């Protein structure tokens, strides 16, 4: 299992992606997660030609450094299909998702992580959500088949409270919903991404990874206190790491061990970030070795 990190550990606006690629590779990460979502606003201001050149440049830097892009956090809708970020609607979001698949192909990476979402802010039925998300993601099949790039749908979290104090039901926070959506899409280029932090906030036992089995293609490894999406490194929160690692071993997981743990590094002063990255790479290697 290769160790990997999202480039967003070093992301801040105007930081060239080159710098993040070089520093993560030199800290010991063999594989990298391209954080398209963090660049979503930037990408929306680019023509396809400009985006293509941007992706080709990132690929060249990674190749030169001996790093390999193996997953991407794809574009994110926002609260629901009816209420999207950056003024997007379902049509323009689909265009962006298609572009992200083409960019992933240039970067040479096999899996893009996407979120399923609610249809509207209302509490509609799971059946309505399943049907809407199935129809939406099926529209990506032609470009996925053309490029060979797959999508990994991520487990989300419910525990945001409405003003009335009523728990807000999100979609695909429970593994059964995620599995039902993946199995309904029923395509070899559709799998799952397990976010250990979301599962911890959802109050799930990490052993439920075993229910995903061979559907699991990507990981968002991060820790938290069980209440906030803190995106910390393993052992800095309350995630049961033995259960995570044993479950990955039990299902014969073949993907990478990929961090989405940016807050542990971003909070450090500039002069300590590379040391922090090296420590995080050592920690990933330690965990991977517990099941090697
Ligand atoms: Zn995640």
Image: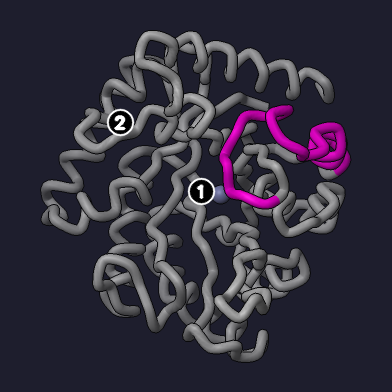
**Distance between the Cα atoms at labels 2 and 1?**
16 Å
Q: Is residue 156 above or below residue 39?
A: below
> Quadrant location of the C terminus?
top right
Does residue 247 show up magenta in the picture?
yes
Q: Who's the residue at 69% across and 45% down the image?
A: 196
Residue drawn at the location 84% of the way across and 35% of the way down: 249
The residue at label 1 has a CB less than 8 Å from ligand 1: no
How many numbered marks appear? 2
Query: Percent from the top left, x then y, of residue 29?
Result: 52, 19
Where residue 145 appears, x then y in whole percent? 45, 61
Mark 2 surroundings within 10 Å by alpha-carbon count, few (fewer than 14), some (14 through 19), many (20 or more): many
Whether 91 is among the magenta residues is: no
**Which quarter of the rendered picture does the N terminus lie within?**
top right
> Which residue is at a point 44% across and 20% down the rendered structure image?
268
Instruction: Judge from the rendering whether residue 89 lies leftward or rightward of residue 29; answer left or right.
Output: left
- Give the percent coordinates (x, y) of residue 111: 51, 48
Quadrant in the picture for residue 14:
top left
Q: In the rendered view, tell whether residue 249 sits above or below residue 226.
A: above
Task: Say whether disc 2 or disc 1 marks the residue closer to the N-terminus.
Answer: 2
For residue 91, above or below residue 96: below
Q: Circle 1: is it few (<14), some (14-19), or many (20+) Cα within 10 Å?
A: many
Residue placed under numbered mark 2 in the picture: 59
- Start-end of magenta stretch: 227-250
Q: Secondary structure at mark 2?
A: helix
Q: Residue furthest front?
A: 164
What secondary structure is marked by label 1?
strand
User: Which sits in the foreground, 216 or 277?
Assistant: 277
Q: Do the residues under discs 2 and 1 have CB atoms within 8 angstroms?
A: no
Query: Percent x, y for residue 209?
Result: 79, 50
Instruction: Name the residue carrying label 1.
Output: 111
Disc 2 C-beta below 8 A from ligand 1? no
In depth, the one of 164 and 35 nearer the eye is 164
């Amino acid at each position: 299992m290769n160790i990997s990190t999202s480039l967003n550990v070093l992301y801040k606006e105007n930081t060239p992606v080159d710098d993040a690629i070089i520093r993560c590779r030199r800290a010991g990460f063999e594989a990298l997660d391209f954080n398209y979502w963090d660049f979503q606003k930037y990408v929306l201001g680019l023509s396809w030609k400009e985006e293509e050149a941007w992706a080709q440049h990132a690929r060249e830097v990674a190749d030169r450094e001996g790093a390999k892009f193996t997953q991407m956090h794809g574009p994110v809708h926002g609260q629901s299909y009816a209420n999207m970020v950056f003024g997007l609607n379902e049509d323009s979001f689909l265009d962006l998702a298609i572009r992200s698949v083409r960019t992933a192909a240039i970067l040479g990476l096999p899996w893009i992580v996407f979120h399923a979402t609610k249809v509207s802010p209302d509490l509609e039925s799971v059946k309505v959500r399943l049907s809407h998300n199935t129809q939406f993601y099926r529209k990506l099949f032609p470009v996925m088949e053309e490029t060979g790039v797959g999508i990994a749908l991520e487990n989300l979290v419910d525990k945001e409270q409405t003003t009335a104090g009523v728990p807000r039901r999100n979609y695909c926070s429970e593994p059964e919903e995620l599995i039902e959506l993946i199995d309904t899409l029923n395509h070899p280029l559709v799998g799952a991404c397990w976010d250990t932090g979301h599962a911890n906030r959802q109050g799930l036992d990490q052993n439920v990874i075993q229910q995903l089995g061979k559907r699991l293609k990507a990981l968002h490894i991060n820790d938290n206190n069980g209440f906030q999406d803190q995106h910390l490194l393993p052992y800095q929160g309350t995630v049961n790491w033995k259960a995570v690692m044993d479950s990955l071993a039990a299902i014969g997981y073949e993907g990478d061990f990929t961090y989405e743990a940016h807050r542990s590094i971003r909070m450090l002063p500039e002069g300590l970030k590379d040391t922090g990255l090296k420590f995080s790479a050592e920690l990933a290697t330690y965990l991977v070795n517990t099941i090697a």
